[in-house]
Image (cartoon, grey):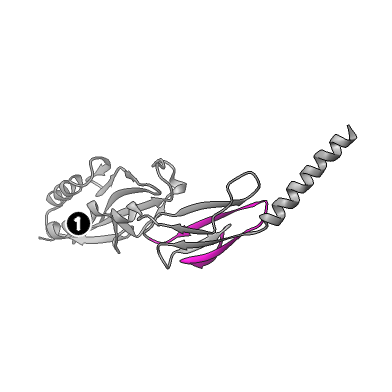
Amino acid sequence: MKNILKSVLLIISVMAITFSASAGKKVVKFTVSEPDAKIFVDGKMMGSGQLEILIPPYACVNVKIEKMGYLIGLIEFCNKPGITPPPKTYFYQMEKDDAYDATEATDVANVDIEIKTTKKEDDAWKLLSQIITTYFDVLEVTDKNTGYLRTAWVVQTFKQKTIRTRLIVKLASTDPLAYKIKLVSEVAGASQVSVKNDELFKEWDRILRRYKEIIREAQTRLGS
């Protein structure tokens, strides 16, 4: 029995020594399709475009690749016995962010845009409501007496983001007649986020292209 136990211990020791000697630390020459993409290793920014990644024995490292306009890449390399060892070289092809492709940067997102008009209040309110309902299906609040209107959130989900958009109108003054219009655009950093999870959304200086003309149309038609 003692001899069997000694044999087992000897085999385990030999396996451990063999792994340490043959495997040891591993180095992966990591290259990204975008030369200026940032490479993070275990949460620390280590380089851009290409990097030699060290994986200690009996350990795993997590690699994250980021570049604005592209989807975030996440890869794990492990250097442990019994699993496929990390490759000597690795090329990562980044994928375009579909949320960026569907939006554009703007300086009118999340700011009050004042629009003055010479139209009568009833006519201006009716025209403003008509313009808004060509872009938004649901008006959550509408009160002509106070000059306040708010649409319901419209949510669009993408591979790694969720965007919600709404429009808010407030009466700025009655003489001259003027309204403040705010196009609210917010983004959450994950797909399929519920519109009710306010804490996961933050203001975004990009808007969905379907809404890019709404402010200009309101300015043009109310001002004419």
- Furthest residue in direction left, as rendered: 224
What range is drawn magenta here? Answer: 43-68
In the rendered structure, the answer to whether residue 32 lies left or right of residue 58 reads: left
* Of residues 59 and 158, the one drawn nearer to the viewer in this rendering: 59
In the rendered structure, the answer to whether residue 35 lies left or right of residue 221 reads: right
Q: Is 149 located above or below residue 36 in the figure?
A: above
In the rendered structure, the answer to whether residue 143 lies left or right of residue 44 reads: left
Where is residue 33 drawn, in percent x and y?
Answer: 40, 62
* Of residues 131 and 3, the one drawn nearer to the viewer in this rendering: 3
Which secondary structure lies at badge 1?
Answer: loop
What residue is pinned by disc 1? 213
* Of residues 99 and 64, the one drawn nearer to the viewer in this rendering: 64
Q: Is 109 located above or below residue 201 in the figure?
A: below
Instruction: Please tell me whether residue 60 belongs to the stretch shown in magenta.
Output: yes
Q: Quadrant of residue 112?
A: bottom left
Q: Is 66 located above or below residue 5 in the figure?
A: below
Where is residue 223 drawn, in percent x and y?
Answer: 13, 61
For badge 1, the amino acid type reads Glu
Q: Residue at x 17, y 56 (%)?
A: 218
- Furthest residue in direction right, as rendered: 2
Q: Quadrant of residue 28?
A: bottom right
Q: Quadrant of residue 92?
A: bottom left
Q: Residue at x 15, y 52 (%)?
A: 124
